[in-house]
Image (tube, rainbow, N blue to C red):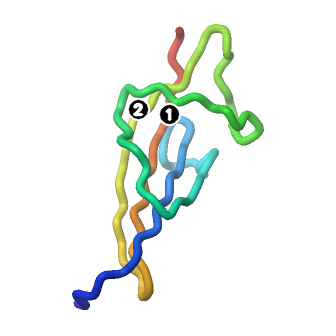
Amino acid sequence: MSRELKPTKYALEVYENCFSNEPSYHVFSSTPFSSISIGDRFEPKVTQTWVDPPNELTEKFVISEVEHLIFALESYNTHKVMIALKKSFI
């Protein structure tokens, strides 16, 4: 196992309801994402990506699960955060 320092790439995948579906939204970054916790609200600003978006007047997305995957590739490391959302009434 190599001990050399490699750059890290960050990914965020957002799922509706559970991780067994395809992600509804994903984004990549060269810097870490801020803290994400179960119970946090998630505002879906990119509306065309959601299978079943919340009704803006009566519902919101809330984070129900968070998983972290960290793995090393040959030239860089990856830290992927996967979050699952559920709808909650306002």
Q: Which residue is mark 2?
A: 64
Q: Amino acid at mark 1?
A: Leu
Q: Residues within 10 Å of mark 1 (few under 14, many from 20)?
A: many
Q: Determine whether, in the image, residue 66 is placed left or right of residue 11.
A: left
Q: Residues within 10 Å of mark 2 (few under 14, many from 20)?
A: some
Q: Determine whether, in the image, residue 70 is placed left or right of residue 9.
A: left
Q: Residue at x 34, y 66 (%)?
A: 70
Q: Residue at x 38, y 39 (%)?
A: 36
> Which callout, 1 or 2, points at the residue further toward the start of the chain?
2
Mark on residue 85?
A: 1
Q: Amino acid at mark 2?
A: Ser
Q: Nearer the viewer, residue 56 or 3?
A: 3
- Mark 1 and mark 2: span between their CA atoms? 5 Å
Mark on residue 8?
A: none
The furthest residue to the bottom: 2
State the image quarter where residue 54 is shown.
top right
Q: Residue at x 46, y 68 (%)?
A: 9
Q: Residue at x 49, y 41 (%)?
A: 18
